Structure formats: C-alpha cells, structure tokens
Amino acid sequence: MSHQHFDTDINIGISACLIGQKVRFDASHKQSQFCVNEFGEHVKFVPYCPEVAIGLPVPRPTVRQIDVDGVIHVSRPDGTMDVTDKLRDYGQKVAPKLADISGYVFCAKSPSCGMERVKVYSQDGKGSTSDGIGVFAREIMKRYPYLPCEENGRLNDARLRENFVARVFAYKHFQTLEASGLSKHKLMVFHSQYKYLLMSHDILKYREAGRLLAKMQDNVDEIGKQYLAILMTAMKKIASRKGHANTLQHIQGYFSNELNGSEKQELCQHIEDYRAGLVPLMVPLTMIKHYLMEYPKDYLAQQVYLQPHPVSLKLRYSH
C-alpha cells in the first residue's frame, strides 16, 4: 500500500483554547482530546486566539455578534467595546501567513472563531439567529476556500472526524505536488491515485475531474486549481454506504481472474452486508487488502482510498 502521502510535516491551524491554552473569556480552555492526544501525533498545531491577539484581557467580558441595521458587529451586549474591525484586520493580517497549513480546527459558536451557526443577536437583545460566521474565521476561509476546516464539537462525530482527517491528508498531498512543480504527468498520476476515493464520495465529481484532466493543454496551473476545487468539494460530502459499496465492487473486479467462485461470493456478501449496514467498512476492506497482498496489483496498491490516513488513528472502525 502506498503511504508516501503521510511522510511530510503537516501544519494545522487551531483555536488556541482547543489545545489547552487558557485564553477563553473566563480564563478556561476547551481542550480537544482527539486533537491533542490522537491527531497531534501526526500533525503540528499552529494556535491562534484572535481575541487575545487584538489585546483583549484574560479573563474578559463576553462579546457577541450583534446585527445592527444589517451589519454584524462584535461587541459587549450593550454595544460597547466594539472589536469588529480589529478582529477582521487581524484575520486579514494572519491569513496570508497560513499558506502552508493543511487544515484548521475552529472553536464552535465563537463570535471570532466559529465556522458556522454562530449566534447573531438582534440589537435589542431579544432575539437571535444561528447563522453567523466568526469574524476571524471568515477571513481565513475566504482566503483559502478549499482548506479543510472543522469545529471542535463536530469532531466528536466519528464520520465527520474521519472525513476531516482524510481531507487534511489529501490537501497536504496536493500542496506537496504543487510545491514540486505541477506537470500534466504529475496531475494524471495524482488523479489515478485518488480515483476510487473520489468515486466513493461523489460519482458526479469523479466524472467531472476526469473530464477536466482530459482537456488539459499547457494551462497546468489553472487546471490544478480547478482539480483541487473538485477534489475538496467532493470529499466534503460524507461518503455514503452506497458510495463505498459501489467503489468496493469496482475494486473487486480487479480480482475476477484470481478468485474462485466461493471467494467471489464471500466478498460480494461482505460488500452487500456493509451496504445494508450490517457490518462496518473495515470488513470488506480488510478482505480486499488481504487479496491485494496475495495478488499484488500496482494500480490498486496506489489507491489512497484503501488507506486515506494513518492506520494508528483507527478512524474507519466505527462506521
């Protein structure tokens, strides 16, 4: 199995409170056990706390997002201590320095760092909606629209966690490819490694990627940008059981000459059991990896789908 895309140093932006820094308004932290104890074995975290960075003290009065005549402000509930511009300016200052990060973990619900669903209060304080984006987070995501981003709370969900980590490794792999100088050949090789991963997430995006590369001329850098957009958009969609099962069936086809009738039947049964929700993904996947060891196939061995992140993270066992 090809593991070369795990070799490099990976930098991940993170809200400082999530790695245990006591920078929250009440001088507490919200340490993420997964980030610190598991993911942290494979990546280096680059922490930011925009509220402290712009000079707010610890502890500090809470600030919130307030809709003032259609414009979002971040301030105390009574409108004093408005830090909207400072937070935005800080985001715009930090964003260009993050070109080498491969993902970002934001602190949920924060008026500065929330990725989505941040509370926005009405001016009179009587009502609120949950459709805001943290002022700092918005600047980072605007600068890097395809950067894998996630929030601490959502990382408690096994499928969202696995999806985020897979996106981080794919994004880093593409960054390494770009840094080495894109060429038509390199892009085609990259795509051939990601074919089945793309297929499992989104069959339409998989086809779109193929069409894009088929019309590649000398505009390699432009095609590269478009390819990354297709790949990351597809991977953001959680792969369904149906998507995985169809992909596994395609892979099974590679062994049609080697397997006897009962082996084929057994593998088919495992794939169907997975599709029906009776067994986890690891069951058919382990069997395919076993046959790949027995009957080596270079093309399959290169497929990122079979191992999109380090085994030690154990991310595929729960679904």
Image (tube, helix red, strand yellow):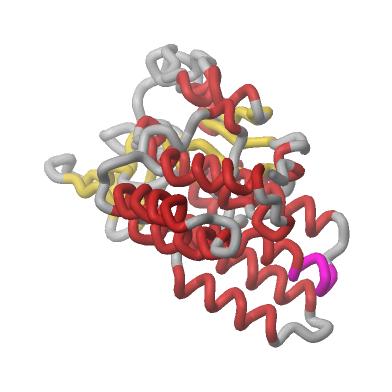
Task: From the viewer's side, name the closer residue of 3 and 51.
Answer: 3
Q: Is residue 35 left or right of residue 77?
A: right
Which is more toward the observer, 112 or 37?
Answer: 37
Quadrant of the image occupied by residue 227? bottom right
Q: Residue at x 73, y 75 (%)?
A: 222
Residue 178: say if magenta. Answer: no
Residue 99 position within the rendered picture, expressed as x and y whole percent measured from the top left = 72, 49
Quarter of the rendering occupied by the C terminus: top left
Q: How far across and how far down the image is residue 311, in percent?
A: 58, 31
Identify the residue at the far right of this view: 181
Task: Kindly give the residue lying farthest to the left in the view shown.
Answer: 126
| Residue 26 shows up from this direction | yes
186 drawn magenta: yes
Residue 200's place in the image compared with 316, above or below, is below
Predominant SS of the magenta segment: helix
Is 313 placed left or right of 7 in the picture? left
- Res 95 visible: no
Q: Which residues are magenta?
A: 183-188
Nearest the viewer among 10 and 257 is 257
Which is more toward the observer, 262 or 91? Answer: 262
Query: Is residue 304 placed above or below 41 in the rendered structure?
Result: below
